Image (cartoon, grey):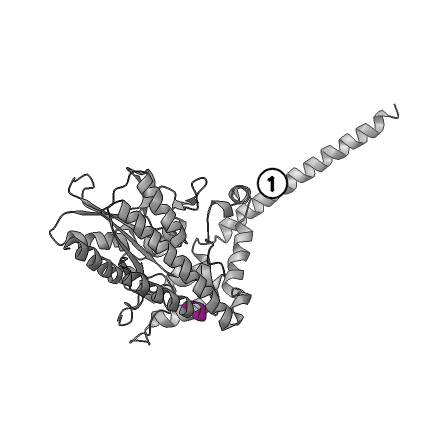
Amino acid sequence: MNAARPREVWRQRFVSAAIIGTTTIVLFYLVDWGYGLAVPTKPYAASAERLTASAYKHEPYFSEAFLVESFTQPGGWETPPDTRIVVPKPYAGKDFHVDVLPPTGLPYRRTINPDATDPQARVVLLLGGSTVYNSEVPDGLTLASQLSALLNATGGPPYVVLNAGVSSVNTTQELERLEAEIARGLKPWAVLTLNGINDVNQGVYFGSPEGVMFSGDQRSRTKEWLRAVLPLNIWHSFRVTAQQRNTRTVPAHLDTIESIDALAVETGKVYSRNVEAMYRVSQRAGAHFWSVLQPHFYSTEYQHSGSADLAEVAALTERTLPESRAAFESGYRELRATTSTLRARGIGVSDASGIFADKTDDIFLDMAHVNSIGNRMLAEHLAALVLADAGS
């Protein structure tokens, strides 16, 4: 009798603890759910400056609904097993679409193209980071869509542009994506890659020339699952507030110009190696190739330096990437030198880092991303390269 009583006591304590624990969890879910209804966090809250950005002021497609979709699409990014490739999830929205296309079975941001089944169509594979994927504009105004429009306005054979841009990737991942495209059966007429910013950001600012910003090895499936199931409305609200008030900690290696320059030299070597490898892969596939060094906020001196977008982006960059000017100036000095060396060796490269110097419109949304007008300027540069090859 006495032996049974302790077991009964422990059983009652366990039941009480389970009830209290379950009640606490349910209450927290209810409180968090109620908080989310009462104080909803906008998807773009951490980048609230986009809502009033001068670069969006005269863009006819822009609205808060567009901005919400811009920050929620494509619903996630995938990393195929045993690769460093990153691809968007398939997505169908109002202004954004990601389509899985033959022959590769890979997803691409939608480009407004002519009939892809035309046997005369020339396929142009466009590689790059978020400035190619273009979350800042609707499908019809991406760099890829505007490039397609320019190429198909010439009256020659039809061109089909595939937008294989992916947020945060550098040339290391672009090379791997190109190899996967060819291995999966794509036969491009031309390969274009717009790059530079992510290589310098990863290699110099974050101090890892051989590294990548995001890949399968860096993903935690457990954390992703927990974020999907846990009540996080309150947490997101405090996190957004912290992001808006606090600046990023400046990496310690940026303290001296010697360490910055050393990382820039190493980054230039990796960049050169990757660009040459992409050129060789394209050659073996029978494709024309161009690697284009992209422009960014620090890559030129602006003739119209009083424009509103420049002042906005200067303040924003100091908050999100503080003291990054030296890293990008040193990094791009190396990439420009690398571009000149590669060009002298007959590899298709082009330096577009200065094409925004004489801009008259507000185009910058941050130090790397531009609106549809900026995309048009880039598309014109790329189209000239492709059409020069078409006439050769």
* Label 1 residue SS: helix
Q: Is residue 51 left or right of residue 321?
A: left
Q: Which residue lies furthest to the left in this view?
A: 155
**Residue 247 falls within the magenta-colored stretch:** no
**Residue 325 falls within the magenta-colored stretch:** yes
Splitting the image into 4 quarters, where does residue 13 fall? top right
One can see residue 135 in this view:
no
Q: Position of residue 305 (x, y in %)?
A: 32, 76
Q: In which quarter of the image is the N terminus?
A: top right
Q: What stretch is highlighted in magenta?
A: 324-328
Q: Tag 1: residue type?
A: Val
Q: Which residue is depicted at the point 32% across and 54% down?
A: 132
Mark 1 neighbour class, 10 Å CA radius: few under 14, some 14 to 19, many 20 or more:
few
Q: Is residue 203 left or right of residue 392?
A: right
Q: Which residue lies furthest to the top in this view?
A: 1
Height in image: 42 above or below 120? below
Front position in the image: 282 or 124: 282
Q: Position of residue 42 (x, y in %)?
A: 44, 54
Q: Which residue lies furthest to the right in this view?
A: 2
Q: Quadrant of the C terminus?
A: bottom left
Give the residue pinned by disc 1: 26
